[in-house]
Image: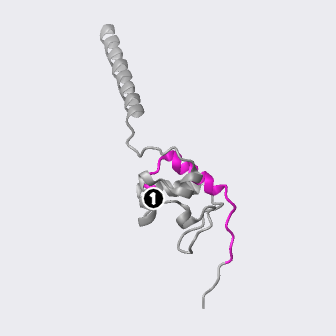
Amino acid sequence: MKRICIVLVSMMLAVGWAGMAQAEEGHEGHSSGPKDSGMTAKEIVQKGIPSKNVSACKSCHGETGKSTSPAFPDLGGQYQSYLARALHEYRSKYRTSAIMNMQAKNLTDREIDALAEYFSNQTPVVGTPTLEE
């Protein structure tokens, strides 16, 4: 009985170890997500990532997060965690926007975090809403 238990425990440990090794091997070599561009947030804001069909953020949100149009939200000074979550949700299509789903779908976690940090560190955009007559 003792030998059977030892053999079973040894087999379980061997199978578990082999599974962990395969998981690590697969994790290192093959990523199921988009490839990182290596660009800084400022570069992405100014130039976009042409190889991933990501437009320059400044086209809609301005270089410092001050929107170029009332149709697009101001991002300057927003909470970093909010911006990162929003981009992750656009990437996963949990949040839907034809424009932002296309922009975020090829961003990596690092690129999302860098953009969120960049815009959160900009001067907040403060304005007074105007009523149209």
Residue 129 vertical placement versus 27 (above, below): below
Q: Position of residue 5 (x, y in %)?
A: 33, 13
Q: Which residues are magenta?
A: 103-128
* Amino acid carrying mark 1 in the image: Gln
Q: Is residue 105 visible?
A: yes
Residue 36, position in %: x, y? 47, 44
For label 1, count other residues whose C-alpha is less than 10 Å away and answer few (under 14), some (14-19) or many (20+).
many
Q: Is residue 127 left or right of residue 105?
A: right
Q: Count all numbered tags in the image, as a single digit.
A: 1
Kind of element beneath mark 1: helix
Q: Quadrant of the C terminus?
A: bottom right
Residue found at x 56% / y 75%: 70
Residue 59 belongs to the span the image colors magenta = no
Please tell me which residue is depicted at 41% across the width and 29% down the height of the picture.
Answer: 24
Location of the N terminus by quadrant is: top left
Question: Left of 82 or right of it: where is 91?
Answer: left
Residue 118 falls within the magenta-colored stretch: yes
Q: Residue furthest top?
A: 3
Please tell me which residue is depicted at 35% across the width and 18% down the height of the picture: 14
Q: Nearer the viewer, residue 54 or 105?
A: 54
Q: Which residue is identified by label 1?
A: 103
Tell me if I can see residue 97 in this picture.
Answer: no
Q: Residue furthest bottom?
A: 133
Instruction: Please indicate whether residue 55 sits to the left or right of residue 15 in the image.
Output: right
Determine whether 99 is above or below 52 in the image: below
Percent of width and height locating residue 63:
61, 61
Q: Position of residue 132 (x, y in %)?
A: 60, 87
Name the residue nearer the viewer: 76 or 1.
76
